[in-house]
Image (cartoon, helix red, strand yellow):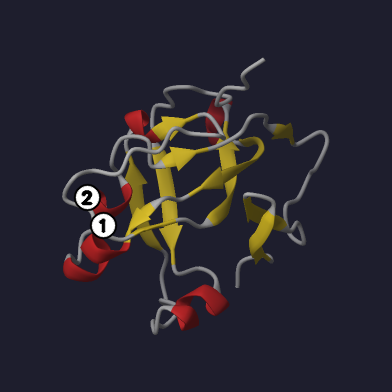
Amino acid sequence: MTLLAPVPRPRAIFGIGRNYAAHAAETGAQVPSAPLVFMKLPTSSVPPGGPVRRPAVVHELDYEVELAVVIGEGGRIAGWAVADDVSARDLQRAEAQWTRAKGFDTSCPWGPWITTVDEVRDAVGLRISSYVNGELRRTRPRPT
């Protein structure tokens, strides 16, 4: 059985950049005073195991485990999911606008399920982790 993304082609995928102090420090950046918002396209959405396809122009591909907030009817939080924010770091450094660096096709593996708000009312304190070939690569605490 192959697990799929919970919403194969979501209407929109918004990300918030540099909202983790530790990750901002890793990249030599400051946490911004206001949210730094970027978008991924509906075609960025793929199942949790990918495939992720690197665009030919990209030379430095990276990943970040993220907590996805799934917005439901009336703009209310419907639930939470684990996502991978795949990024072209070379393009991200070269361009102030992050569309090419973060919004390319297959750049958002996520799921395979959504944990609904009746199961977890508040995501504060949740920890998520990413593994590559069974090796722990990154753990995310709550945003700062």
Mark carried by residue 100: 2
Q: CA distance from mark 1 to mark 2?
A: 6 Å
Question: Above or below — where is 77 with respect to 102?
Answer: above
Judge by depth and name the residue closer to the eye, 74 or 14: 14
Question: Above or below — where is 12 with respect to 40?
Answer: above
Residue 55 relative to residue 126: left or right: left
Measuring from the top left, give residue 14's x and y in whole percent: 41, 45
Looking at the picture, which amino acid does disc 1 mark?
Trp
Q: State if disc 2 and disc 1 touch (CB < 8 Å).
A: yes
Number of marks in the rendered image: 2
**Quarter of the figure that contains the C terminus:** bottom right
From the image, tell me which residue sits under label 1.
Answer: 98
Q: Residue at x 16, y 50 (%)?
A: 57
Looking at the picture, which amino acid does disc 2 mark?
Arg
Measuring from the top left, give residue 49's x and y in whole percent: 55, 34
Q: Residue at x 21, y 60 (%)?
A: 97
Residue 94 relative to residue 22: left or right: left
Q: Secondary structure at mark 1?
A: loop
- Quadrant housing residue 3: top right
Measuring from the top left, give residue 92's x and y in whole percent: 26, 63
Q: Residue furthest right?
A: 119
Judge by depth and name the residue closer to the eye, 81 or 64: 64
For label 2, the crowd category at 10 Å Cα-Cα, with few meaning under 14, some 14 to 19 and many 20 or more, is some
Q: Residue furthest front?
A: 133
- Quadrant housing residue 140: bottom right
